[in-house]
Image: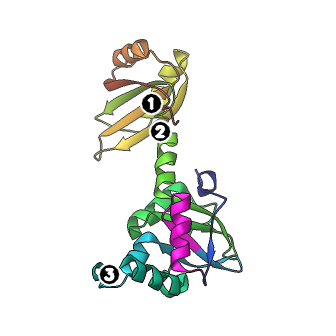
Amino acid sequence: MYVEHYMTKDVITVSEDTRVLDALDIMEGNNFHRLPIVRDGKLIGLISEGIVLENSPARANKMSIHEINYLLTKTTVSQIMTKDVKTVSKDTLIEEAATIMSDNNIGVLPVVDEENHVIGIITDKDVFKAFIDLTGYNERGSRLILDIPEDHPGILEDITNILAESNTSITHIYVHRIAKDFSEVTIQLDTEDASEIEELLRYEGYSVKNSIATTPVDKE
């Protein structure tokens, strides 16, 4: 899974001479919290609501709203923007983007091309969506979780062969290695009633820890 598949492509950006107050209005009007700053389409910085707050006057609690707004109209984003911005390309793996966000305690990555032009933006929410899609949790069907106390090569082949012989379609499968020789195998099936499959796997010697019916989430 690549960043390109989950990034927002129609990115709103601002120039370095944009007033901070105007940048805040753009963020509020579009319900997001960060803005890439560009010069000739190339990324030169990033501003966020948090950065604005960090750069607000120390005595803001003693100032009137009028005075604060006045200062914000006189300040441009270039004066307070973050210049050391972590970025990714559209061909970056989602897992790598998630690692960069986690390691640097950030929630957004501008997506740039070879010449540093901004072509997209990906956020932690996009990564969460990719994870959910990867696991198939929001798809209609059933999910079986198997305990594999003695993991060894060939386990997945054996499980998939058992399901293939029963004419059961697997939509998603992944392994969580909990300890050196202990793993959980999660299987997403396209059938809503997995009771027979569950019994079959138990008959073949597998420990079915859990069986869950899954349904699409209404996003409206």
The residue wearing badge 2 is: 135
C-alpha gap between disc 1 and disc 3: 54 Å
Magenta residue check for 19: yes
Regarding mark 2 in the picture, which secondary structure is present there? helix
C-alpha gap between disc 1 and disc 2: 9 Å
How many residues crowd mark 2 within 10 Å: few (<14), some (14–19), many (20+)? some
Identify which amino acid the numbered label 2 is placed on.
Answer: Thr
Of labels 3 and 2, the one closer to you = 3
Pick whichever, 164 or 36, lies toward us: 36
Asked whether the residues under the numbered discs 1 and 3 touch, taking CB atoms below 8 Å apart as contact, a structural biologist would say no
First in sequence: mark 3 vs mark 2: 3
**Residue 103 coordinates in the image, percent (x, y):** 39, 67
Identify which amino acid the numbered label 3 is placed on.
Answer: Ala
Tell me if residue 120 comes above or below residue 44 in the rendering.
Answer: above
Residue drawn at point x = 58 percent, y = 50 percent: 1
Q: How did the renderer colour the structure?
A: rainbow
Of labels 1 and 2, the one closer to you = 2
The residue wearing badge 1 is: 187
From where the camera sits, is residue 158 visible? Answer: no
